[in-house]
Amino acid sequence: MGDVDPEDLVIGRISGVYGIKGWVRIHSFTEPVENLLSYRDWKVRRRGQWKSIVIDDGKRHGKGLVAHIEGVDDRDEAAALKGLDIAVPRSLLPALQDEEYYWHQLEGLSVMCGGELLGRVDHLIETGANDVLVVKPCTGSRDEQERLLPWLLGTVVTLVDLQKQVIEVDWDPEF
């Protein structure tokens, strides 16, 4: 499949159909989930190609979202979209305050502890109490251990340098 344009960010996935009039269920990767609906011009990936679509209506439904795509007016058309990723241009994301980061900015960063490479951020997990960095070993890392580090700025995470692509942590590497 074709990759998403580096200027775009995958923010959700069409997970199923809703009703008989072309509505789809959406699994949102945004927080809160309804933020996904603030973007009306989406791109979806079908057969390796990204195609623009327009959302003309959408709402929260249970724990997820439902939306109607312009020009998709029956259940069969909607069912054909199940499983497609949804992307929007990164430039549309709201600006963040100091020491706030989008997860996609942290993924792939090197994690250093006392000058020693622990690995790279593979992804993050939302736990409720705090987010967790999943740090996987990489070339040059101290060992082959995967680590789960709490995202606690100022205590565990002591520095994030997006320019240098590095996160400094205060963490016992043996843990």
Image (spheres, grey):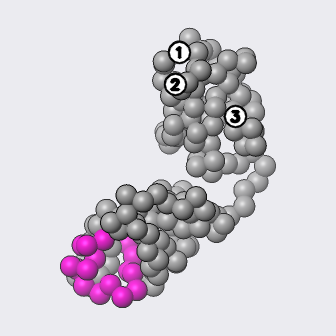
Residue 132: mark: none
Extreme-top residue of the structure = 174
| Residue tagged 1 | 143
Q: Left of 33 or right of it: where is 65?
A: left
The answer to whether residue 26 of the structure is visible from this angle is no
Q: Secondary structure at mark 1?
A: loop
Q: Quadrant of the N terminus?
A: bottom left
Q: Amino acid at mark 2?
A: Pro
Q: Residue at x 64, y 28 (%)?
A: 111
Q: Left of 67 or right of it: where is 132?
A: right
Q: Residue at x 72, y 61 (%)?
A: 95
Q: Which residues are magenta?
A: 66-81
Distance (Cα) linking label 3 and label 1: 18 Å
| Residue tagged 2 | 137
Q: Amino acid at mark 1?
A: Asp
Instruction: Name the one closer to the observer, 85 or 45.
Output: 45
Q: Secondary structure at mark 2?
A: loop
Instruction: Name the one closer to the observer, 62 or 19.
Output: 19
